[in-house]
Image: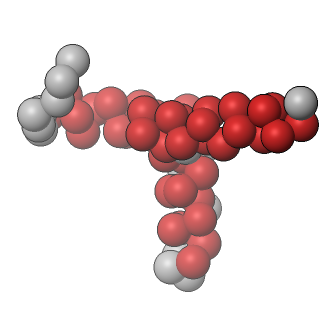
Amino acid sequence: MSALVEGFRGFARYLGGVMGADAYQKYLEHHYASGHLNQPMTEREFWRDRTDRQDSNPQGRCC
């Protein structure tokens, strides 16, 4: 049973990555690794900025 649960969790992480659900976490990791001196955006600010950038510069997407 444990292997099944771990398999499902792995699939959920993969699917979340494909859908972009982990984008904020990746942003934070990049922000700190790059040595920025300013504070990172809050999660709310990040998603608003991302949405605004996608709306102002649309790229090919399936949906």
Q: Position of residue 49 (x, y in %)?
A: 37, 39
Q: Position of residue 20 (x, y in %)?
A: 44, 38
Looking at the picture, tell me which residue is in the foreground, 47 or 10. 10
Q: Residue at x 89, y 37 (%)?
A: 2
Q: Spot the residue most to the right.
A: 2
In this figure, what is the number of numbered marks? 0
Q: Residue at x 60, y 72 (%)?
A: 32
Q: Is residue 42 left or right of residue 17?
A: right
Q: Position of residue 31 (x, y in %)?
A: 53, 67
From what the image shows, is residue 36 above or below residue 12? below
Q: Position of residue 62 (x, y in %)?
A: 18, 24
Q: Is residue 7 left or right of residue 51?
A: right
Q: Where on the picture, by quarter, is residue 28? A: bottom right
Q: Residue at x 50, y 79 (%)?
A: 34
Query: What is the quadrant of the C terminus in the image?
Result: top left
From what the image shows, is residue 5 above or below residue 14? above
Query: What is the quadrant of the N terminus in the image?
Result: top right
Q: Spot the residue most to the bottom.
A: 35
From what the image shows, is residue 63 above or below residue 48? above
Q: Where on the picture, by quarter, is residue 39? A: bottom right
Q: Residue at x 82, y 40 (%)?
A: 3
What colouring method underlies this structural image? Answer: secondary structure
Looking at the picture, tell me which residue is in the foreground, 15 or 29. 15
Whether residue 22 is visible to the viewer of this picture, yes or no, is yes
Whether residue 20 is visible to the viewer of this picture, yes or no, is no
Q: Where on the picture, by quarter, is residue 56? A: top left
Q: Is residue 60 left or right of residue 25?
A: left
